[in-house]
């Protein structure tokens, strides 16, 4: 299996706990790890309706949590010698992942297995590993 460049996709800060598996895979295959936090379209408005909070405040909070997760993962990867590239995007996960796979010649997609990521398994043009 070729694993030169892998992308680990997070859709919320709770996905961070499976990062260790992504880091270890990249260490084993001497791969570069792209870490992508996606604030999915529609998530902010759903949360705003449920919590009665303003969308702008929620977006800022989720974005801050996203960057915090990315930096923590980068710190862990750095300790094991795995090179990382951090990214945060807003939009539809399938569209954003495809853009990154094409732009950076990613050969493997790493995601936490959950209902929200099923669409990534189905739509990906590269192998997907569920963590």
Image (cartoon, helix red, strand yellow):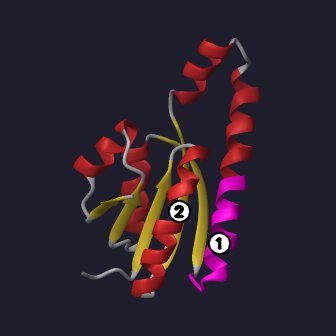
Instruction: Name the residue located 65 percent from the left edge and 70 percent from the top edge.
Output: 74
Q: Which mark is residue 19?
A: 2
Determine whether 8 is above or below 28 in the image: above
Instruction: Name the residue located 26 percent from the left edge and 65 percent from the top edge.
Output: 127
Instruction: Tell me whether the residue at label 1 lies in contact with that at label 2, contact meaning CB atoms closer than 8 angstroms.
Output: yes
| Residues in magenta, as a range | 68-82
The majority secondary structure of the magenta stretch comes to: helix
Q: Secondary structure at mark 1?
A: helix
Instruction: Name the residue located 39 percent from the left edge and 83 percent from the top edge.
Output: 4
Q: Which mark is residue 103?
A: none
- Residue 55 is drawn in which quadrant? top right
Q: Is residue 76 magenta?
A: yes
Determine whether 50 is above or below 114 in the image: above
Q: Position of residue 84 (x, y in %)?
A: 58, 75
Side of 52 where 106 appears, left or right: left
Q: Secondary structure at mark 2?
A: helix
Q: Is residue 45 magenta?
A: no
Side of 88 where 1 appears, left or right: left
Q: Position of residue 51 (x, y in %)?
A: 67, 15
Q: Marks 1 and 2, Cα distance to the nearest angstrom?
A: 9 Å
Instruction: Look at the image and tell me in which quarter the N terminus lies.
Output: bottom left
Q: Which residue is mark 1?
A: 76
Would you call the spot at circle 1 few (<14 residues within 10 Å), some (14-19), or many (20 or more)? Answer: some
Taking depth in this image into account, of 117 and 55 the one nearest to the observer is: 117
Mark sitting earlier along the chain (1/2): 2
- Residue 118 is drawn in which quadrant? top left
- Residue 31 is drawn in which quadrant? bottom left
Would you call the spot at circle 2 few (<14 residues within 10 Å), some (14-19), or many (20 or more)? Answer: many
Q: Position of residue 97 (x, y in %)?
A: 41, 55
């Amino acid at each position: 299996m070729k694993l030169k460049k892998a992308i680990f996709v997070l859709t919320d800060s709770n996905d961070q706990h499976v990062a260790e598996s992504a880091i270890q895979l990249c260490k084993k295959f001497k791969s570069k790890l792209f870490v992508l936090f996606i604030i999915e379209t529609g998530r902010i408005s759903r949360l705003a309706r449920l919590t009665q909070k303003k969308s702008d405040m929620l977006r800022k909070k989720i974005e801050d949590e996203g960057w915090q997760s990315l930096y923590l993962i980068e710190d862990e990867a750095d300790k094991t010698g795995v090179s990382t590239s951090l990214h945060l995007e807003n939009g539809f996960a399938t569209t954003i992942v495809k853009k990154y796979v094409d732009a950076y010649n990613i050969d493997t997609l790493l995601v936490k297995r959950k209902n929200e990521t099923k669409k990534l398994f189905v739509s990906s043009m590269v192998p997907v590993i569920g963590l």
